Image (cartoon, grey):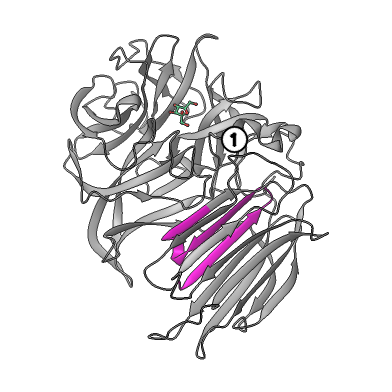
Amino acid sequence: GDYTGPLRPRVHYSPPKGFMNDPNGLFKDNNGTWHLYYQYNPTDVVAGNQHWGHATSPDLYDWTNQPIALFPPNSSTGVFSGSAVVDSNNTSGFFQNTTEGVVAIYTLNTPTKQVQEIAYSYDGGYTFTPYSGNPVIDVGSNQFRDPKVIWYDDHWVMVIAYAAEYVIGIYTSPNLKDWTHASNVSHVGFLGIQYECPNLVKLPVKNSSSDTAEDGWVLTISINPGAPLGGSITQYFPGTFNGTHFNPYDGATRLSNFGKDDYAGQFFYDEPVSIGWASNWEYTNIVPTASEGWRSSMTLPRNNYLVDSGARGYQLVQEIYDVSPVLSNQLNTSNNLVNSTVGNITFNNGVYFDMNITLPSNVTFAATAAINFTVSTSSSRESVRGGYILSSSTPYTIWLDRGQTNGFDSPFFTDKFSESQLRPAKRIQGMIDRSVFEVYVDNGAVVGTMDVYPAEPFTTLSVGSGDLPGGSEISFAAWELKDVW
Ligand code: FRU
């Protein structure tokens, strides 16, 4: 692939050429190599002709493109989204001499219906053979897709979307070949127009200072179209799971991102680690990166856990996965950001910043009390901006604005995003990586991801704060990003 285009992210994954959407088949092999497959059209820069592209990485940032892993059997079919497992006990019977057998479970989209198929790999996930007994599930529906499989005690569990019915089906299997319908989760949260790409995952529960002994379950459901901000978004439901039935703890709807460009996220098999697709079906097929021969990137990789937030119940925390492998030289560090500004932090590839904030308790914040950050082009004609509002009339609100960019225009390319918290933030991390801007508040309790398309490259970061009360402290540091390509 040619990764020289000015909109090409340096540390977020994007495909060698053509069009990419959902992450698929995520797993980590016994050598510690992470495998990322993805919905892939190798022949055009719009969705269609779906294959599974493939890339591998030692650290979730430095990806090596691999040959396409799954091909549609003919031109009227597509290999749609799905997952992968490591069948170390050879439950499937495919693997006589290895504990490293990989099975992919995916939807085959045909002109008349969507059926579930499996394929097995003897070489650790590089090449796959479709099972001769396919399909393994066929309910005669043309809206039935995106199987995600996990292991529970003594059996496999699949969650899958009956997309047009707002139902997530739960199936069980002893061997990945024979599947039994066990239960449904119906009509929860925002319905959108369709449910897609469900995930069921067991995550550690932490309190503010340490791990607890508990685990908790989370069901994620992606909806498209019909997200509250338009197009596609992912929601999640903390709850209980007993091997066959999932029950959400409450009726609340929680979105996993307050931006507009984080969809169809998937968890790695048997890991609390996830990656999302950093785009939105409302405009993904028309964004300007086509002139560079590619479209769409992934989100940053995330390490996930749950916290009990009190008033809002269990909350998903999506930490940035250890980013140190892709940080280059430190550009700036300051312990003096309170009511002052550090401007002109210049970078080439992109910038990652980390702000730790201590505020006095029991104060009333001035109406103008705020933290701000701006990324601009060298001519200053374009910028993306963000900040954190402390004032009690708009309490504890993170916001982002991509309106001042000139490289792309669409009525669906919403400018402004925000989310409010119950308490002031203690930490804000941000990354501008060419055409992707991500912000993580309080280690990922609140995450904002937005694509940005400047006409000229971003070169400069400035950060600052104003009207913070006495006793406030902010420590700040910024790093240049490496270029993994
Ligand atoms: C979600 C989705 C899935 C489907 C895939 C097709 O973005 O629509 O439901 O399997 O994309 O590429």
Quadrant in which the C terminus is drawn? top right
Residue 170, magenta (yes or no): no
Name of the residue lying farthest toward the right = 379
Residue positioned 59% across, 83% down in the render: 338
Whether residue 32 is visible to the viewer of this picture, yes or no, is no
Above/below status of 434 relative to 25: below
Read off the residue under disc 1.
283
> Residue 351 at x, y = what percent?
67, 61
Pick the front one: 448 or 212: 448
Pick the front one: 61 or 236: 236
**Structural crowding at the residue carrying mark 1, measured as other residues with C-alpha within 10 Å and reported as few (<14), some (14–19) or many (≥20):** some
Q: How many marks?
A: 1
Amino acid at pointer 1: Tyr
Label 1 residue SS = loop
135 sits to left or right of 345 = left
Residue 427, magenta (yes or no): yes
> Residue 104 at x, y = what percent?
40, 26
Residue positioned 53% across, 61% down in the render: 399
> Residue 246 at x, y = what percent?
20, 41
Above/below status of 85 relative to 343: above
Q: Which residues are magenta?
A: 425-448
What is the magenta segment's predominant secondary structure? strand
Quadrant in which the N terminus is drawn? top right
> Residue 23 at x, y = what percent?
49, 36
